[in-house]
Image (spheres, rainbow, N blue to C red):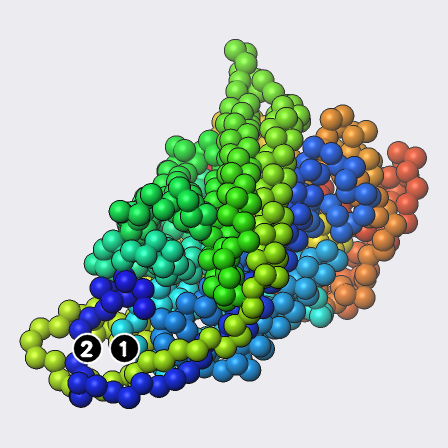
Amino acid sequence: MIVSESTAAPAQHLTSPSLPVEKFSYDNKIVKWFAYAVLFWSLVGMLAGLWASISLFYPGINLGLPATTFGRMRPVHTNAVIFAFVGNGIFMGVYYSLQRLCKARMFSDALSKIHFWGWQGIIVAGAITLFAGFTTGKEYAELEWPIDIAITLVWVIFGINIFGTIIKRRESHLYVAIWFYIATWVTVAMLHIVNSFELPISLFKSYSWYAGVQDALVQWWYGHNAVAFFLTTPYLGLMYYFLPKAANRPVYSYRLSIIHFWALIFIYIWAGPHHLLYTTLPDWAQSLGVVFSVMLIAPSWGGMLNGLFTLRGAWDKVREDPVLKFLVVAITCYGMATFEGPMLSLKNVNAISHFTDWTIAHVHIGALGWNGFLTFGVLYWIIPKMWNTPLYSKKLAGTHFWIGTIGIILYAIPLYWAGFAQSMMWKTFTEEGQLKFQFLETVTHVIPMYVTRSIGGALYIVGAVIMVYNLRKTIKQGSFVANEAAEAAPLPKEVATHGKQHWHRWIEKRPMQMLVFSLIAVAIGGILEMVPTFLVKSNVPTLSSVKPYTPLELHGRDIYVREGCYTCHSQMVRPFRDEVARYGEYSKAGEFVYDHPFQWGSKRTGPDLARLGGKYPDSWHYNHMLDPQSMSPGSIMPSYGWLLDNKIDTSKTPAMIRAMQTLGVPYPAGYDQEANKDLTAQAESIKKSLQAEKIKTNHQQEIVALIAYLQRMGKDIKSVPKEETAIK
């Protein structure tokens, strides 16, 4: 038992002064499997990120292939890092620490194996489908419905295994790390299920059940809290276990950990709307997001300080111990990111940062520093333990630490610089009142920052390769302990406690009550934000001029989603002078009511497209997709030549229309059988328009459908009566 466990645990009231000791063993084999998966997927996910970052200044790296464009590579990178690298890191740490905290072997070795192979299968299936363009178009939730179901099943298996272990534990007290594991499990389950409501039309195609503003609110309730409860709370649990272990010191404050835990999980869930400031989300929801985001500083820094103060009296060890080096920087990056996050939620700051590379820098301080370094520290700690041997080389671990740290700095600082530059250039006017810079000028200006970012990312990967080599040599020199012998007395029965007992000591002995109370704490915020947005009509006022997409436009929108255009382009004109001057009338809630899913985006590597319709002729879009540089010299957009060859799959049109009808889109009854006629007529019209510009194409090509969708963007709002446009 670590020192902090004994100091944190409440006194036990036993029925007898002594109990027989039981012998058992810890399952290190499952921990080893997950550790190997972490090492493998870390390199895969980071290399995908490096590839994507290089494509932003050297589009030729896409090789002219659909699978390697930024729009498809970015979700591969984010999913690989979040669910493969960090996900396996969570399971590695939980399976190692939970057994020792409960003084019990995992509930079921078979469930552990099913969990491992099921999760790796999900990762592989996710990568293949994302490369192939099968995506829901919702950030961090791009995987299609069959994989969503598989995630749910594997997550349930994980839950059965951890709760089965907790229930059969030999330690009465639930240590603080276990609280975070419980909250993680129940909240991720809730987030995933609610955000994954979708209507399938084929094996790998579905439409979000929600539309427009509601879809945006649900998505960023999920997206923000995926960061909170997949990238934060489980890692706080790992921090509370491995930091005291590595430092051989008790946790600084047990009482602070109680306040930190409950405040964090309750407040975090409300903060999602800060991703949607100045959008068409109702102002009251935006304000709630801001208020709770600012409040988040207190519990977040409570956890950070509890971690750093745990090292009191042990800072001399930090100079020598590579594990502590990684953990200290990880906790520091957590503190930096959780201070910056609330600052970015302030409207005056968000007006500068949103849609820029500032957000990318912020995210990677957390991902590279907090998640990456803490995972590396845990790996350096558990692998020598499980192989019963010292680390092969502390010097190599130190080299990894410094290369990784320099990599983070070279990654983040240029992007902060780029973010400020982008925002200032977007907003600058000349003395005559005209926008000073064309959008493309803001792109080419930050290319040197993109190059430096990639150098930083490459250094970080070099550090990870050094770690893999170091741990491989450690494994070779040691002897693996698959079943680590342990012994402990069985869980004693409690007798009545005389006197007043602290409420938290009561709940710490009752895992199911901890589960229920955690669920209540995290459910409140989502319910109070989403229910009014869905039920109160004035939150999303309709516009009479907004009509459903035509069948051809619907196909074009699916192509737009498939190619990941939302990763570089927004569809949300905020009510700022510069955006209205650059793009046109600011966006209204009612214009997105038929958007399943919404496509507002979160980053402007390219310009906003919400008012693109009619701005350029059909021929411009055709040539731009074929050779972007010919229409916009200096553009970093890759060619989408395959759209000129691929044919529209009109066999899916009836299913697409029926799905939209089910979701409330007012197509006429029986229109699914007539839709392809309208599709052909509109496609022929675009074909003739292209022929007039001496461009020969077939009306069945995908480029025709995409042009139809691009030309539709923003056209409805241009015909809205003035009294309706006044409604936000």
Secondary element under disc 1, as helix, strand or loop, is loop
x, y percent for residue 587: 53, 41
Residue lying furthest left: 499
Look at label 1 and name its amino acid: Ser
Return the residue at label 2: 12
Mark 2 and mark 1: span between their CA atoms?
8 Å
x, y percent for residue 629: 78, 30
Q: Nearer the viewer, residue 709 or 675?
A: 709
Residue 261 disc label: none
Tell me the residue at 28%/88% (across/down).
20
Look at label 2 and name its amino acid: Gln
Secondary element under disc 2, as helix, strand or loop, is loop
Q: Quadrant of residue 583?
A: top right
Badge 2 vs badge 1, beta-carbon distance below 8 Å: yes
Tell me the residue at 58%/77% (across/down).
114
x, y percent for residue 342: 37, 42
Residue 172 disc label: 1
Q: Is residue 460 above or below residue 552?
A: above
Q: Nearer the viewer, residue 411 or 565?
A: 411
Mark 2 Cα within 10 Å, few/some/many (few <14, many 20+)?
A: some
